[in-house]
Amino acid sequence: MAGKASPRGGGSTHRPPTLRSGFSTGTAASAAAMAALRLLLTGTTAEAIAVRLPSGVYLGVPVAGGSLDDGTGCARVIKDGGDDPDVTNGAEIRARVNIFCNTSLGSAKAPEIVVFAGTGIGTVTKPGLPALPGEPAINPGPRQMISENITLELLRADRSALERVLQKAPPQGGHASGKPALRLPLYATEDRLLSLPDGFAIAIEIEAPKGEELARHTLNPRLGVIGGISILGTTGLVRPFSHEAYEETIQAAFSVAASNSRSDCVVLSTGGKSERFSRQILPELAPEAFVQIADFFRFAVLEAVKFGFSRIIHSVFFGKAVKMASGHPYTHAHAAPLDLEFLAATARELGRDEKTCARLAAANTARHALDILAEGGSGDVVASIARKAAEESTRLTGDACRIRLLLFDYDGNLLADVTPPGARDDREAPL
């Protein structure tokens, strides 16, 4: 981000500070598990852990503390999202680690890692997510990171220390037995690991003490993830204000919708309020069919096509509709300022006088512009904007989807219900 140039052409001497990157919940969980295992093997709590990220780069992660409790290593990491306003930023992620030498955690005799969902970690209940129903809500990226980093920690361990822990290991079961679990292989097959006895298992329980509370501010309940947060992260890093996390959430919502809604239709709303209004219009659709896409208009439409939906219904307010109609792929105010000149031009095309058009172009907000249109009884201008927005969606999907757009005012009144010209009226299609 560069400082603005001065009106006279000179460069500003002030530059905004660079936004700081952070690390994901997957990285935090991996670091906590490594620190807990190291404490179990050495009796020492590490101040920081070098976590190997999927890219092969190592990231130093501070350890907030640790303890030994009756043969269990425990460690805490504070998730640091950098300058990204993520709901899990500052959350405590814990790991409790045991080593066992038996087959009670599963039928496989090969050495393995068993990861349990502890307090505050969600459990998947619906198909369509990367984790299967009944498994902890831990995505593939973090699974790989945990497997790889625990393997590397074993390779670093002193052999005699590992043997001492094995001698004291209980003959069966872990403290987390009975909780939702997933089994991971050790990452490599070096000779040192091959010499581990049959039935060797590392049991890792991941916890987030405030996870259940935090999850209420996420889409987890909608996606069928109950009991807490998900452990996420494709790269292991969090880039400030990046779109990656929200795009992954939209993809997950589509996957759940495709697996559970029993319909070829998906309803794309810009947020909770517009979704609530569309549910009143479309009560026959399953809850999973409603997906909140925020400002990711183009991305969501193209992803809906990839997931095989043949009908898309947009549920929007006037400001977003104007931006969609103007051709903006991303409708956030920072990336796409409201183009009221476009609205004024549309009004002019429909025969509005220049005074009205000038007032529209100079309106303070979309709500203000809508009030001006309401004063003049300009429902045709509103409907035209809705049709143009639907046409932009059709331009993205081609013949792959039928498009319908519901345009609401800010009190939930339906201002327009349109399909692009020439398209089959989706209102008559069976849902």
Image (tube, rainbow, N blue to C red):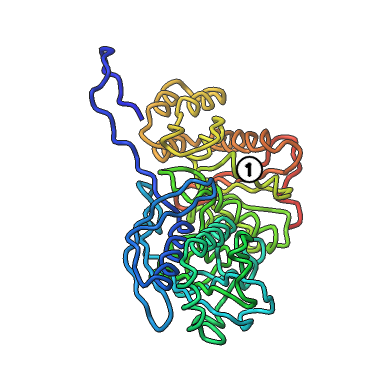
Going by the picture, which residue comes out furthest to the front?
Answer: 160
Camera-side residue of 348 and 139: 139
Give how far across and how far down residue 179 sits, in percent: 55, 79
- How many marks do you count on the picture? 1
Image height of 36 relative to 353, above or below: below
Label 1, residues with CA under 10 Å away: few <14, some 14-19, many ≥20:
many
In the image, what residue occupies the spot 41% across and 41% down? 367
Camera-side residue of 217 and 360: 217
Q: Which image quarter holds the C terminus?
A: bottom right
Left or right of residue 105: residue 154: left
Give how far across and how far down residue 404 sits, in percent: 66, 45
Give how far across and how far down residue 328 sits, in percent: 53, 32
Report the amino acid beneath label 1: Val
Left or right of residue 215: residue 313: right
In the image, what residue occupies the spot 72% across and 44% down? 402
Q: Quadrant of residue 192?
A: bottom right
Left or right of residue 84: residue 191: right
Going by the picture, which residue comes out furthest to the top?
Answer: 8
Q: Quadrant of residue 195?
A: bottom right
Q: Secondary structure at mark 1?
A: helix
Camera-side residue of 22 and 309: 22
Going by the picture, which residue comes out furthest to the left?
Answer: 13
Image height of 248 relative to 165, above or below: above
Is residue 275 in view from this perspective? yes
Q: To which residue does mark 1 refer?
A: 301
Is residue 216 in view from this perspective? no
Q: Which image quarter holds the N terminus?
A: top left
Give how far across and how far down residue 67 sits, in percent: 34, 74
Image height of 51 relative to 286, above or below: above
In the image, what residue occupies the spot 59% across and 66% down? 193
Left or right of residue 191: residue 330: left
In the image, what residue occupies the spot 65% across and 41% down? 302
